[in-house]
Amino acid sequence: MIVSTTELFRHAYGKYALGAYNINNAEQTMGLFQGCMDSQAPFMIQISKGARSYTDKRMLEAMIRAADEIFPDAIFAVHLDHGDEEACMDCIESGFYSSVMIDASHEPFDRNVEITKRVVDAAHARNIVVEAELGQLGGVEEDISVSEEDANLTNPEEAEQFVKATGCDSLACAIGTSHGAYKFTGSQGLHFEVIEEIQKRLPGFPLVMHGSSSVPHDEVERINAAGGALKDAKGVDEKQFAPAAKMGVTKVNIDTDGRLVWCRVHREEFRDDPSNFDLRKPGKVFMAEYAKYIAHKNKVLGSEGKLAEVRAILNK
Ligand code: G3H
Ligand code: 13P
Ligand code: ZN
């Protein structure tokens, strides 16, 4: 059942984080729903601008509607990931999305406020909530690439001003992570001091962590052993999710890890069975492996087992 992002956030805030997982195709969608049912977790399903144009936005929406029928006990919100103003307006008007993200974080502060405020006004008029972004993560997303030198952590004082000026409902903050598989070298990790300071200034306000994939070492090793050429990739330490959630990080965005599972399964399948040309064989393995991965992720995020409570507060 598709529910409001606000309700999911209200239940999770300060206790656990909701996994926000990107989908692009039917196999990811099936694996995601199966994994969330296996772990009895509420979740966010997110669609990026790139995903909307990979096949067709109507294809993704139809897949989500179908998955909702196939898994009638699932409770989730549908979210636009990294939208520009045009994509946000389109999603708001479609009536299908629970929430949208306007990402104008590459713009100067005042212009970010101006664009975000326009989206917030349009979204709130339709009862849709808005995630905005302030600060810049490193890495690559869509057609925007931010070098490590240009990436900068969110300034807590600006975060307070930004939220008050725009009326946005949650904020994606740059707290040391980056998009993609190459996040950290050495022992870097999350900047808890930034999260703490933002929460002090904005008590009760949900924060969002982007670039949250953990890039499991064994996954990278298996990909490389099956012909891949990933460099020394490193992601977010899973032990950091629980303390971040207690400090108000309510939504944790994960995409790259799912792509790694896909890559490992397909490389191994074709290496081990070179005469196979049936897409359904690796596809089946991927759906099962992805479901397992999602269930594990929900466990470390703390959303595992929360479905019954969420259903009770929603009275469904
Ligand atoms: O943050 C970006 C997400 O991983 C989505 O990636 O824009 O390639 O679909 P994408
Ligand atoms: P990862 O690249 O770490 O999976 O981050 C995904 C993300 O932030 C989607 O918005
Ligand atoms: Zn992101």
Image (cartoon, rainbow, N blue to C red):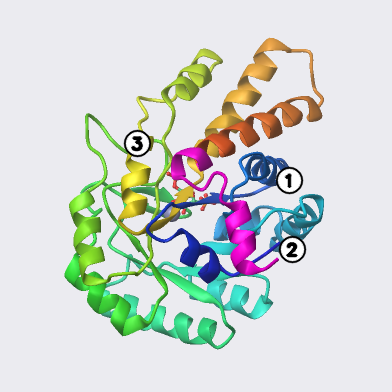
- Mark toward the start of the polypeptide (1 vs 3): 1
Residue at 35%, 82% (x, y): give it.
Answer: 166
Q: Amino acid at mark 3?
A: Lys
Expressed as whole percent of the image width and height from the top left, the position of residue 179 reads 40, 46
Highlighted magenta segment, given as a residue range: 298-316
At 19% from the left and 62% from the top, the residue drawn is 197
Give the quadrant of the C terminus. Answer: bottom right
Residue for badge 1: 26
314 magenta-colored: yes
Q: Give the spatial CA distance, label 1 vs label 3.
A: 30 Å
The mark lying in front, picked from 2 and 3, is 3
* Secondary-structure class at tag 3: helix
Of labels 1 and 3, the one closer to you: 3
As helix, strand or loop, the secondary structure at mark 2 comes to helix
Image x and y of residue 102, in percent: 45, 70
- Give the residue pinned by disc 2: 58
Local crowd size for mark 3, using a 10 Å CA cut-off: few (<14), some (14–19), many (≥20): few
Q: Which mark is residue 239?
A: 3
Question: Label 2 amino acid?
Answer: Arg
Q: Which amino acid does the dot numbered 1 rest on? A: Ala
* Dot 2 and dot 3 residues touching (CB under 8 Å): no
Q: Nearer the viewer, residue 96 or 41?
A: 41
Tell me residue 265's x, y (percent): 63, 24
